[in-house]
Every structure is written in C-alpha cells, then in structure tokens.
Image (cartoon, rainbow, N blue to C red):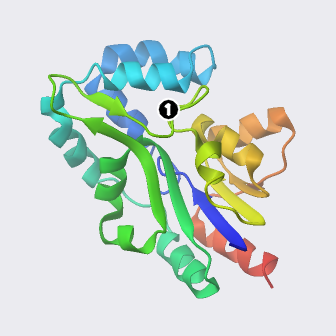
Amino acid sequence: MRRIVFCDFDGTITVEETFVAVLKNFAPELSAKLLPEMYARRVTLRQGVRQILESIPSSRYSEILEFTQIQPIRPGFVELLDFLEFQGVPLVVISGGLRGMVETVLDSLVQRVHAIHAVDVDTSSTHLKVISPFEGGTELIAKVQIMSKYPAYQKIAIGDSLTDLNMALEANVVFARDRLAEYLDEHKKLYIPWDNFLQVRDYLVKLWK
C-alpha cells in the first residue's frame, strides 16, 4: 500500500470517551481507583483495562451496547471516508475498547472501513472475559503490532489519548488532540492539532496534492 490511515475510536470517532464512560458506569469503584493510575502510567493499560472489564458481569453486556448506541460520531467522519475512498486509501480502526461498541456506533459505516481491531469479550461465564489477539507490552491492543501488518510508505495516525501514543510515535503523520497531544509534546513528536474530521480531510487534501 502507498498510504494507510489508522484511526482510534473512543474520543476520536466518537465525540465523547465512550469506553471510559462505559468503565465508569459499569465498574465505578474499580474505575475510580485504576483510571488515574493508568493515565499516570503507574498501571499499564493491559493490566488496568483487563481488571476493570473482567469485574463486569456478563449479564450486563447488552446494557453496555445499548449505552454505546446513543454516542454521537465526531463531525466530518463520513466526509473523510468519502475522500479516502476517492483516493483509494484504506482506513483501519484500532480501538483499545470493545469491538461490539465500535460496530454498534459505526452501524452501516462498518462496511466502509478497511478493518476493525479491538478487544473481544467472552460472555459465556459469569463475568466478562477479555480476548485480545494483539495483546503485548503495556497494551491490551498493541497498536504498533497491528500497524506492522499493513505495509505502507506513509502511515497516518488519528487519536486523542494514551492508548494512541505508541501508534502516534510509529506514524509518519499524526493528528492529535486532548491527552495525546500532551503526551506527544513530552516526546517532542510533531503532530497536527485537530478537532473534527473535516480538518483532517482538508489537511490531507493539501498534503497529497
């Protein structure tokens, strides 16, 4: 591939941090304890997210998907997809959250993304059991490991938080907002600030002239 776009889901495609909201709503006490530790990088995402998810009863999984369904998509996402399709550039969604949440929110747009990589859960036991084929290092979804499966000379990353840091450090071009921008400032990695996908599209239109 000549170019490929890797896009986070929570707080990136969705306006709000959907997955964090799910954790806070369905495991409030453990989330209050572990989320600050994860943001401060004293507890890894791999440890913290697994621990919180696996504390949630499987019987509540349908409630999680219902909670997710009402989450609005950030403006300009469809227009970005239109532009990327015209350019023949695939968009891959990589989420540190649940696949079911991603598919619920994207709905018919699932058909327009090249692939979705996210956390799967087994609901056959009393509590959710995390399944992640791309677990590694500090991450439940090792985004760089997934990126390596898509050879391209130009890799573009779009993200907003700690789960996107390694992906952003690996990419040639990075669109960053919120916590991700702060982490990249610490790493002295250049990025393009953004707030909606129309800004991403317009930047890429100029970049790819």
Q: Which image quadrant: the N terminus? A: bottom right
Q: In the displayed structure, would residue 182 be above or below residue 39?
A: below
Crowding near pointer 1: few (<14 within 10 Å), some, many (20+)?
many
> Which element type, helix, strand or loop, lies under badge 1?
loop
Q: Which image quadrant: the C terminus? A: bottom right
Query: Which quadrant holds residue 124?
Result: top left
Left or right, 154 with respect to 115, comes to: right
Q: Can residue 22 be seen in this view?
A: yes
Query: Which quadrant holds residue 90?
Result: bottom right
Query: Which quadrant holds residue 137?
Result: top right
Left or right, 8 with respect to 70, comes to: right
The percent position of residue 24, horizontal first and vertical second, equals: 35, 27
Residue visible at 28% across and 28% down in the picture = 129
Q: In the displayed structure, would residue 182 be above or below residue 78?
A: above
Q: Mark 1 points at which residue?
A: 140
The percent position of residue 20, horizontal first and vertical second, equals: 42, 34
Q: In the displayed structure, would residue 126 be above or below residue 64?
A: above
**Outermost residue, right side:** 188
Q: Which amino acid does label 1 sit on?
A: Leu
Left or right, 97 with respect to 150, comes to: left
